[in-house]
Amino acid sequence: MNALNPALSPVSVPPGQATSTQEVRCAVRFPLALPVVLSAGADELVAFTRNVSASGALFELPDPMTTGLEIRFSLRMPGSVLGTPHDILVHCLGRVVRCSLSESQYLVGATIDEYKFAEQ
C-alpha cells in the first residue's frame, strides 16, 4: 500500500544523517567576548557575550532570564572585526529566545530586532 502513497513510503537515509540536526543560521557568528550591560525594564545585568551576529547574540550571565523578555544592550564592536579604523558602539533592542545552564553560567540567546550606531 505504501507504494501507492509516496507520503507513506519508507525513506532511505544515508547512515549518520538520521540523528544529526542541521542548524540554519541567517548571519555569520563571531566568537567575541565583549562586556555588555543588559537592561530589562528597571533591572540591569553585567554580562559578557560569547558570540555575536547581525541578528543576535549569546550572553553569559550569572542568573537566568525569561524567554520572550525584551532587552536592551550596547556593544562596542571591534574595528578589526568590522573592517573599520575604529571600534563602533551599537545600541540594540532585542528579546530573549532561549536560556540554558552551562556549568556555572547561564547562556542566554537573544535576537537583535533593532539596532542603531552611536554617533562618535
Image (tube, rainbow, N blue to C red):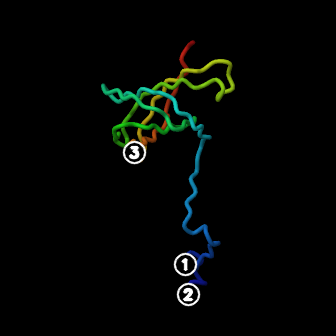
Spatial CA span between label 3 and label 1? 37 Å
SS class of the residue under badge 3? strand
Residue 95 falls in image quadrant: top left
**Which of the two discs, 3 and 1, labels the residue nearer the N terminus?**
1
SS class of the residue under badge 1? helix
Residue annotated with mark 1: 8
**Along the viewing direction, whichever of 54 and 85 lies nearer the viewer:** 85
- The residue sitting at 55% across, 13% down in the picture is 119
Q: Along the horizontal axis of the image, is 77 left or right of 103?
A: right
Whether residue 40 is situated above or below residue 58 in the rendered picture: above
The kind of residue tagged 3 is: Cys
Residue 76's disc number: none
**Residue 102, how many percent across, how many down?**
41, 47
Judged by depth in the image, the label closer to the viewer, 3 or 1, is 3
Residue annotated with mark 3: 99
Residue 1's disc number: 2
Residue 93 falls in image quadrant: top left
**Which of the two discs, 2 and 3, labels the residue nearer the N terminus?**
2
Spatial CA span between label 2 and label 3? 45 Å
**Along the viewing direction, whichever of 20 and 92 lies nearer the viewer:** 20
Spatial CA span between label 1 and label 2? 9 Å
- The residue sitting at 35% across, 30% down in the picture is 40
Asked if the residue at tag 2 contacts the one at tag 1, i.e. Cβ–Cβ closer than 8 Å, the answer is yes
The kind of residue tagged 2 is: Met
Location of the N terminus by quadrant is: bottom right
**Which of the two discs, 1 and 2, labels the residue nearer the N terminus?**
2
**Residue 68, how many percent across, how many down?**
37, 41
Location of the C terminus by quadrant is: top right
The kind of residue tagged 1 is: Leu
Whether residue 6 is situated above or below residue 96 in the rendered picture: below
**Residue 111, how many percent across, how many down?**
48, 38
